[in-house]
Image (spheres, rainbow, N blue to C red):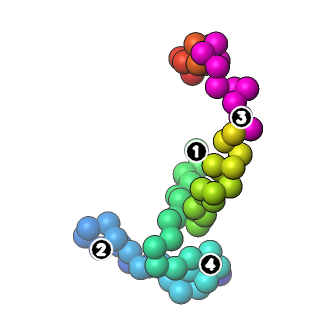
Amino acid sequence: MTALAKITSKGQTTIPQEVRKALQAGPGDLLAWDLAADGKVTVRRVRPLDLDYLKAVEGTLSEWASAEDEAAYRDL
């Protein structure tokens, strides 16, 4: 399937309905544009992180939060 969309002078475009449906994307969703070295571009919907889950997991990661870890990985 090929879907066409025109770019405005402000660099904006309307995402065709078929593409929005395939991405399961709607108003307020974020899209990521991935650029490959060969010039190909893919687009995907970015799902927001589940903050409650991340907060629950955060407490289990304390072994990685020492001063020594901070010093060892500071320049990465």
For the point 71% across and 34% down, the residue is 61
Q: Is residue 43 magenta?
A: no
Please rate how many residues cluster around mark 2, counting C-alpha atoms within 10 Å: few if below 14, some from 14 to 19, many from 20. Answer: few
Query: x, y percentage for residue 31?
Result: 52, 64
* Residue wearing tag 2: 8
Q: CA distance from mark 3 to mark 4?
A: 33 Å
Q: Disc 3 on helix, strand or loop?
A: helix
User: Quick one: label 2 or label 3, which is nearer the N terminus?
Assistant: 2
Q: Is residue 41 among what the camera can see?
A: no
Residue 66 is a magenta residue = yes
Question: Which mark is on residue 37?
Answer: 1
Identify the magenta region. Answer: 60-69
Disc 2 to disc 3: CB gap under 8 Å: no
What is the crowding at mark 4: few (fewer than 14 residues within 10 Å), some, or many (at least 20)? Answer: few
- Report the residue that reaches farthest toward the bottom: 17
Task: Name the residue: 58% across, 44% down.
Answer: 37
**Looking at the picture, does residue 53 appear above or below residue 21?**
above
Q: Which kind of residue does numbered mark 3 sit on?
A: Leu
Q: Is residue 13 left or right of residue 73?
A: left
Which one is in front in this view, the residue at disc 4 or the one at disc 2? 4
Quarter of the image for the N terminus: give it.
bottom right
What residue is pinned by disc 4? 24
Which picture quadrant has residue 41?
Answer: bottom right
Q: CA distance from mark 2 to mark 3?
A: 46 Å
Sequence-wise first label, 4 or 2: 2
| Quarter in which the C terminus is drawn | top right
- Label for residue 61? 3
